[in-house]
Image (spheres, grey):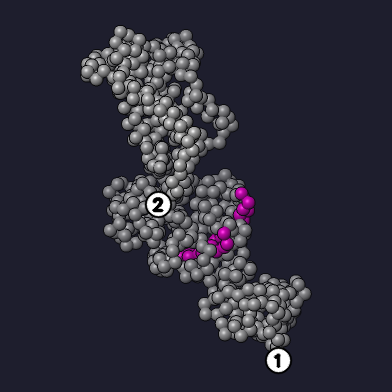
Amino acid sequence: MSLDVEVRTALGALRLDMKVQIEEGEVVALLGPNGAGKTTLLRTIAGLVPIQSGHVELDGEILEEPATGRYVPTEQRSIGFVFQDYLLFPHLSVLDNVAFGLRARGAGRAEAGRRAMEWIDRVGLENRAGSKPAELSGGERQRVALARALAPDPRVLLLDEPLAALDATTRVAVRRDLKMHLASFSGVRLLVTHDPLEAATVADRLIVMEEGKHVQTGTPVEVTEHPRSRYVADLVGVNLYRGQADHGSVLMPGGQVLAAAGAEAGEVFAVIHPRAVSVHRAKPEGSPRNVWHGRAHGVELYGDRARVMIEGEAPIVAEVTPAALAELKLADGGDVWLSFKATDVSVYPA
Amino acid sequence: MRRERAPIWIAILAAIGAAFFVVPLIGLVVKTPWGDALQSLTSTDTLEALKLSLIASLSATAVSLVLGVPLAWIYARIDFPGRTVLRALTTLPMVLPPVVGGIALFLAFGRRGLVGSLLDTTFGITLPFTTAGVVFAETFVAMPFLVLTVEAGLRSMDRRYEDAARTLGARRWTVFTRVTLPLIAPSLLAGAVLCWARALGEFGATITFAGNFPGVTQTMPLAVYLLLESNHPEGSFILSLLLLLVSLAVLVGLRHRWLGSA
């Protein structure tokens, strides 16, 4: 079972131009900022938004292809969709919501009710079957939405921000359950999120998209270690630069030279973890190969550490202990020097 | 909330405005000859008019639902050239003097009318001066209330529920009956009740198009008018009161849905 999608379409200001291939058994997370077109991509796969060119193909069967005029309507695609705010039918009970897809696909009332009840059991809501969605908690609604999407036994499961509507406390528990339910579903699973933690916990592979376009694909580890865009770098919390490598150094577009042990040749990304950056009030002496000058202009608490934003020829974030923060009076801003080792710069081809 | 005192001149004008509505209603209650009430109510003519009114207004509501809901759906969902003009034309009966509506109906569906002559020669059907003609006239005047209310309901509903139903395999008809209609049920009910109340009170178009024949086209409002002109005007009072109570019941019933609960 595999999903092969290549879509180009325009919707308002968004120009969607994406290629996605998902193999059987994979859980893939689409990660990107708001307005990147993640939801629109899911809707094109479901046939809810028409594509202008490209194709949507499931197991070798073309579901949509403007070039040949082929279009399989949404209701005939074997796709389960969990919507962001779940969209449980407010006038139907939990049981009737979950049975809806089975009834719509032709199952008799008794048969649909029996199979829906199995799903309700499976998500642990057997004593809520008669309740209306309005009487459920956020976490329970999420489970009903999942059961409703899975009950008709689809080949593809699409989830649009399945945890975004939940508060932080329930999210942890629901994320764990979701991971378990996703694992028990054998079809293609594609999940949209803007939460890197959610993506990393649930997915085998991440696809990062921005402004309708593909930015990066890889396992959660690959993506977090080798970010390829400012958005991902900010999510992961590292400093990302792009420049021209020249045997031990990287020349940045601003003219600044970064000493980097691994740099060889060609266009590269360079990543420096804020922990590797030391901050000083006076120009440091000694071994570090990189010494920059800048101005501290903001401090953010980050766990039990503090992150200092520093403006200069190239902006950089440094992580310091609260003690250092106080001793250097960094919250007051002002001129600072910072240093980091050439061996702490990770370089990879752009 | 801060309690606000109304300026005196606003209070006076508002009081006159309210009295303008309340006094006639009091007049109706006070001047009704309660002693003859039962007799007036149970006279054959009254009962026939009442029966006819109920049958005709409920039929008009049914016709309005069958034709008006699809029309509202088209207005709310399909963008086609001339939609605005068509919507204005089908809303016109709400503001048109009903007599004018009756005359227009007569010219179209009368025995010599545009469509009426065809109906007469081809099928032998004549609408004017029949009970069907009453339903026609009432539908003409009342359906716009239903169409506008249902269209507003369709426009304000979250269409993504329909998307959700489609991803679950529901065909368009299933989506419409199992998701769309239940979600707009409040608008549907409000529209149907408004439509029915308007049909029940219909006078001008009915008397113009269908005439005033007891037992065939003489509805309650027509009977009220006829009694008022007769030797026993008191009989019309009690019928008026009956219509008033029906209207009041409609208003109270719709209080939450239509008037808001403020």
Label 2 Cα crowd, 10 Å radius (few <14 / some 14-19 / many 20+): many
How dense is the environment of label 1, judged by Cα within 10 Å: few (below 14), some, or many (20 and up)? Answer: few
**Label 1 residue SS:** loop
Residue wearing tag 2: A88
Disc 1 target residue:
A286
Q: Is residue A119 magenta?
A: no
> Which amino acid type is marked by label 1?
Gly
Callout 2 secondary element: loop
Residue occupying image coordinates x 47% and y 56%: A84
Q: Are marks 1 and 2 in contact (CB under 8 Å)?
A: no
Position of A310 compared to A162: left or right?
right
Front residue (pair B69, A48): B69
Q: Residue furthest front?
A: B8
* Residue B205 visible: yes
Q: Residue at x 69, y 74 (%)?
A: A311
- Vertical placement of A44 versus A349: above or below? above
Residue interval drawn in magenta: A12-34
Nearer to us in this view, A100 or A254? A254
